[in-house]
Amino acid sequence: MLYIGTYAAIRGYPVEICDLAGVPQEDWELPEADYYGFVTYSTTYARTLTLLALARQVNPKATMIAGGPHASALPEKVIEDFDYVVVGEGEQALVEILSGDVAPGIITGKPVMDLDLLPMLDYGLVDIDSYHRIVDGKRSFTLLSSRGCPYKCLFCNSLIMGGHKPLRFRSPGIVVDEMMALRAFGDVAYRFGDDLFGGERSWLDAFADNLAGADVTYRAFVRLNQCASPLFVQTLVETGCKHIAVGAESGSNLILKAMRKGLTKQVSREGIRRAKEAGLIVRTYWIVGFPGETWDTVRETVEFVDETRPDEFVVYPLIPYPGTPLYHDPERYGLLNIDQDFSKYFQICGDKHSEFVYDLENADRHELQAMKEHLSKQLEIMHLSWARDSKGYV
């Protein structure tokens, strides 16, 4: 929202961001506007429609625009509710809509190829004090140093927004300038939200050069094949990285191959080992229920975690998000009886709760739930920390 809002604001359009995350529905209030833009997610799309109705009460003549993952995945369906649907990146598309250059309907957003053209985010558009993520115990700000990811994991919802396209980077110096500017808010840390941080060695080296002498703290999402390089993890540590989050997904080579993850157990093992030896806190994400999952593959994952001992974990059910091959061609992958109630498509909520929305040929959703709970329980027995219980990294 901040990228889109700031991009429109510097082009002369009056912008207000109304972030209702964490606000009870009975307390929702919307300002009057000529255009309302909604970031849509499958899990919360029903709530988006409630908010849409509220916006129409505030200004029945306003233009309604939908973007984000759900709108990008199912544009033909979402356009039934909105005047415009933006598929993909939204900065340039929103300006085209506001300028009257495009007719109502479905618009494919042009990706911003030169990310250095994006403005520094205007944090005055939101209530900074309403955000509470921390890194190493410090208040943190989320940054993007790149967009895109060269990998094509079958389950990944980044595919929906074009995340598989070639990596595009912001210049390292510009990223560091933004980090330094955010120090106006005090002794802060940073959280890189890139799908793949440091995805090119030359960029990471230049980032390190630009940060030389600066005392910063950050966490990042990386891949275990990156961490298998001792030079990579050394550079992370030298530039102030304290915590990494990695999608290990499974301890079974059979499942990793089926996912098209681009990893093997050996590479994952080496990546976790090197990251821990370098002093990084390693948070791992695990998925249960990919087609081919059995009690044997779950036990393989338990054994792999017991061997490698990452610091933190989260266990998710596989979610066949709209926009992924698993959702649009389920028979090919052996997913059966997919529930179309998107409000159930959450990775985790409440007290570590999540559920399956499909059956497999060899295991129904109830058995898959038992597999997931077994994995979580075994990791707790090993005294690994559940991510939400992490001390200093939320």
Image: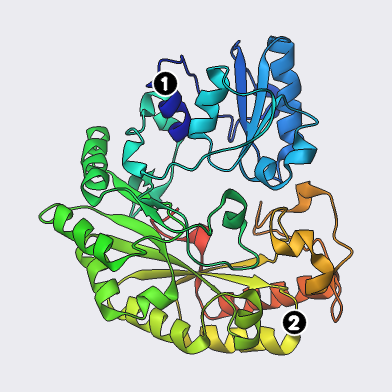
The reply, left or right, for residue 187 in relation to residue 135 is: left
Residue hosting label 2: 292
Whether residue 204 is situated above or below residue 210 in the rendered picture: below
Q: Foreground residue, 96 or 324?
A: 96
Q: How many marks?
A: 2
- Is residue 43 in sight in this rendering? yes
Q: What element carries label 1?
A: helix
Residue 147 placement (x, y as % from top left): 43, 51
Q: What element carries label 2?
A: loop
> Label 2 crowding class (10 Å Cα cut-off): few <14, some 14-19, many 20+?
some
- Is residue 1 in sight in this rendering? no
Residue 12 placement (x, y as % from top left): 41, 15
The reply, left or right, for residue 208 in relation to residue 101 is: left
Residue 55 placement (x, y as % from top left): 69, 18
Query: Of circles 2 and 1, which is in front?
Result: 1
Residue hosting label 1: 9
Q: Foreground residue, 386 or 115?
A: 115
Tell me how far mark 2 sits from mark 1, CA to CA: 49 Å
Q: Residue at horizontal 31%, vertical 79%?
A: 229
